[in-house]
Amino acid sequence: MAIVDVTVIPIGTESPSVSSYVADLHRILQGYEEEGKIRFQLTPMNTIIEGELPVLFQVIQDIHEAPFQQGIQRVATNIRIDDRRDKQTTMEGKLSSVQRKLEK
């Protein structure tokens, strides 16, 4: 199980707002989540996705391609991967670990 931090940036939009593009990506992610392939969390600046690495690469490709389907001619996608193999990790587990240390 890996966790990725993804930011998809459509370049050359008609407006400074990109929330409609984010909503489109959210729908794609919901489909994967409903199939039980990923879990994800939308944040104000990016999206965190949890799943098996090969599936995550497919998800990233799908959300990277989505703005092109809406007529955008350039997309920049930033990806950060946390792939820990010595133990199972989750988004909540990572946060809980920090929270426990803050309580000491």
Image: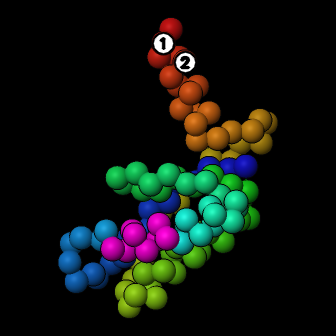
**Residue appearing at x 77%, y 35% in the figure:** 87
Q: Which residue is mark 1?
A: 103
Could you tell me residue 62's position as x and y percent? 57, 76
Query: For residue 18: magenta?
Result: no
**Residue appearing at x 59%, y 74% in the figure:** 61
Could you tell me residue 23's position as x and y percent? 40, 69
Is 13 rendered above or below residue 39? below
Give the magenta-colored segment's residue range. 20-27
Q: Secondary structure at mark 1?
A: loop
Residue 77 visible from this viewpoint: no
Could you tell me residue 11's position as x and y percent? 33, 78
Kind of residue indicated by mark 1? Glu
Magenta span main SS:
helix
- Marker disc for residue 100: 2
Q: CA distance from mark 2 to mark 1?
A: 5 Å
Could you tell me residue 86's position as x and y percent? 79, 36
- Marker disc for residue 52: none
Residue 68 visible from this viewpoint: yes
Q: Toward the viewer: 37 or 2?
A: 37
Q: Are marks 2 and 1 in contact (CB under 8 Å)?
A: yes
**Residue appearing at x 62%, y 61% in the figure:** 33
In this rendering, position of residue 82 left or right of residue 6: right
Kind of residue indicated by mark 2? Arg
Residue neighbourhood size for the residue with mark 1, other residues' Cα within 10 Å, grouped as few (<14), some (14–19), many (≥20): few
